[in-house]
Amino acid sequence: MARYNAKESEQHWQREWETRQSFAAANDSTKPKAYVLEMFPYPSGRIHMGHVRNYTMGDVVARYMRARGNNVLHPMGWDAFGLPAENAAMQNRINPKEWTYANIAAMRAQLKTMGLSLDWSREFATCDEDYYAQQQKLFLDMLAKDLAFRRKSKVNWDPVDHTVLANEQVIDGRGWRSGAIVEQRELTQWFFRISAYADELLTALDGLDRWPDKVRIMQRNWIGKSEGLHFEFSLIGAPGGFEKLPVFTTRPDTMYGPTFAAVSPDHPLAKALAEKDPKAAAFIEECHRIGTSQADIDTAEKLGYDTGIKAQHPGDASIRLPLYIANFVLMDYGTGAIIGCPAHDQRDLDFARKYGLPVIDVFVPLATGERVTDVAFVPPKTDTVRYVQWAGKPGVMTCEEAMKRSLAMFEREGWGRREVNFRLRDWGISRQRYWGCPIPVIHCARCDVVPVPDQDLPVALPDDVTFDKPGNALDHHPTWKYVKCPQCGGDARRETDTMDTFVDSSWYFARFTDPWNDTAPTTPAVVNRMMPVDQYIGGVEHAILHLLYSRFFTRAMKATGHIAMDEPFKGMFTQGMVVHETYRKADGGYASPAEINIAVDGSSRRATLIDGGAEVTIGSIEKMSKSKRNTVDPDDIIGTYGADTARWFMLSDSPPDRDVIWSEEGVKGASRFMQRLWRLVNDSAAVAKSAPAARPATFGADALKLRKATHGALDKVLSGIERLHFNVCLAHIREFANALGDVLTRHATAAPDLAPDLAWAIGEAAAVLVQLVSPMMPHLAEECWQALGQKGLVSEAHWPQIERDLLVEETHTLPVQVNGRKRGEVTVAAGAQNPEIEAAVLALDAVKQALGGKPARKIIVVPQRIVNVVG
RNA sequence: GCGGGCAUGGCGGAAUCGGUAGACGCAAGGGACUUAAAAUCCCUCGGCUCGCAAGAGCCGUGCCGGUUCGAGUCCGGCUGCCCGCACCA
């Protein structure tokens, strides 16, 4: 029999699916909907193995749901705005738009070779005018609801490139491209008021029970809710307007332990002091010079500047604390001012020791009563400790209890109140870039900020831009920004900032439900039927920002009437990375997998360069990356082995949430299995020809055994896909294929006079096997489906009914343990009662021997599982 | 520093509820077919001990302890690795 020709077959079936529109979703279907979505790609130009893994998993779920009878929405698009297009424009003198659309075309062609069951009719790119036009409407609706606003904000400014940099683009205090020292500048920026939903975004996490715990915990920490005490110090000797200093602390129980107070170098009070006091100004300057990178923070010494101002304790006027400007106090958390309690905070202790400030123990360990010396005493809040300075009084209680009682007391005394603080900041979306969605507002000297009127939307990006100057090409454009004010008709200027590309990806999933609507972002009747996404799949790297922004955006769209739900993603799954061995050459450089030969000698492996044969060291397994040169091109794999092989390998072995190690041997194993299935199905088809058309009334022992395996496999694989345990599903499929193979080898020689019931069972088994592999290897499955003479396409077939009565065994073989050690087995009827089983067990020689003639004290029978005799 | 996860053969991993640890695959070794190779098929494959053999026994899921008739799984304490956040008051 001819080997399966993946190349020919895959092209053929991809064309067939396209002509039949097999994967188009219907917005008006009466079937239950299922929305399966993988994170859409950035059009870099080529797909990589991470994409292959992500889209294969999504495709298995989509195909599974379709065969379950759902109306499946499984779309694809492009997250197409962003900096790389501008960099390419600068380097290669190509227009960002041309570059992006050329990349999309190349990647679409690559994706199509994977045979994904996508509804391509809904495809769009976020840089399509049709898409960002609707995004501008959403922005204006949010502006009207005060969910979008402008505020002055500190940014990283690259003075050479004339651009704002994200924190990730600042490396050791320098711009990642220009290498220039980054300045902190105050600019007026656009924000989304995500903080208004902080509490809701936090509490709603509890309801997302089909999300990974890990992601929920990361979001919880990111939102960072903390409860504490808000109060004000009275300042003695402060400049005008700064008589009161608001402070937030999460430890109200330590209110009688501070020995200093401090404000951030960015605090308005610090700035006011700097104007009159050159030394203060110099200190603040120094603080700003110390970088914000992790390494800097780890090593930075605690530094302070004594302002000479005294902070008077609101509960006891006799306590007057020196007020410092301190480099470790952050302006954007709490009020930018702290109380320094050295005994119970390590930073405060370091600071106190450096400046010779006293240390007051508020509480001490119950057991030892030991006082603080070099290490601050910070026990878990639930620990019971001895308070020696609690609100001036002693007591023994947990910190939690003391905090609660302190708060209540201070509120009663009238100088403090309970306050909730969040770590979550409002979302700054202004980017001084060309290749993004223009913020649709006009600045007018008379009317201030004027939204672009509806009839003037979209604010389209001009195509005739140049990148010969650093900075924002929109700003440099000779005419684009000069407009008349829509309100007063006077000379005005367009906003030249564009939106953060995270905005584009915060609602694309909703747009997929009706991308044809050119009058509104969504069509409520449709979006409310097709959303939420039932299964979303993507990398953990988006666990915080993208997912949090999307959750916020869905709420903002609800507030502006574009959707009727809060949560966009009902089920969420984060898949692991694709990793590969690395190869190091003698000169220290990396070699790519395509450049080397591996020789196996027993259990040891040696790598040599194909060109020249020089020895190469096999290095650690790392994430596939260009710098380590350990990438494998999906095109090469699909060209050599076919898409089905690549898909099968991606799902085998490693659990989907863990990293998968790409190896040549593994791919070959997958390819071998594909060919094996092809033979198995063709052999089965030959045998099944002699089978009766109608299902036999009774089945003999061999046929029954095979049918049990068939329906057992069906049950295990389907429930495995449901739980996304793809690697286990594949093992069950292989096990079932082995079982069918055994039957064929045992009976193949007798094929002509094979019992009709067995022939029928073989036909059934082969058909089920093909259907079970169809979500993973869809092309091969179609080819096999045809070889078996089945009607229609397997991609459009419904799952067969699982015959549950075949899953029930008539007899059970139970392992028999004596004192927890296996000594034998008994086979009993399914309905056997315990006394009957116990008698059978005690009759076993091995059991009698193990008991050494003594009677059993107790017999534990776990039905259908195990028997344990206690001697 | 804070938060979370993981640890099972040579390797990736499997083991709904606590119930025969090592499914399935990769690699390796042996054999069959073949002029040969490829392909395919069969056998072995955690360790130790005993046995000519069929087989039998003991040990074994990072380490120490506990709960239980029974622990990879539950509890307490360690060790190592990985991830996220981080001067968050």
Image (cartoon, rainbow, N blue to C red):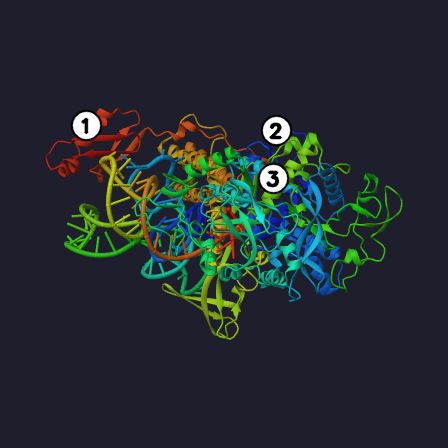
User: Tag 3's secondary structure?
Assistant: helix
Can residue A188 be seen in this snapshot? yes
- Mark 3 / mark 1, whichever is N-terminal: 3
- Name the residue nearer the viewer: A32 or A692: A32
Mark 1 vs mark 2, CA separation in Å: 55 Å
Q: Quick check: A163 above or below B3? A: below
The quadrant where residue A95 appears: bottom right
The x and y percentages for residue A550 are 62, 41
Q: How many labels does the image show?
A: 3
The quadrant where residue A742 appears: top left
Which residue has dot 3 on it? A551
- Mark 2 nearby-residue class (10 Å; few <14, some 14–19, many ≥20): few
Q: Quick check: A827 above or below A642? A: above
Marks 3 and 2: which is nearer the front?
Answer: 3
Left or right: where A412 falls relative to A436: left
Q: Label for residue A695?
A: none
Mark 3 vs mark 1, CA separation in Å: 62 Å
What amino acid is labelled 1 in the image? Ala
Which residue has dot 2 on it? A31
Which residue has dot 1 on it? A839
Q: Are marks 3 and 2 in contact (CB under 8 Å)?
A: no
- Mark 3 / mark 2, whichever is N-terminal: 2
Q: Residue furthest front?
A: A318
- Name the residue nearer the viewer: A225 or A836: A225
- Mark 1 nearby-residue class (10 Å; few <14, some 14–19, many ≥20): few
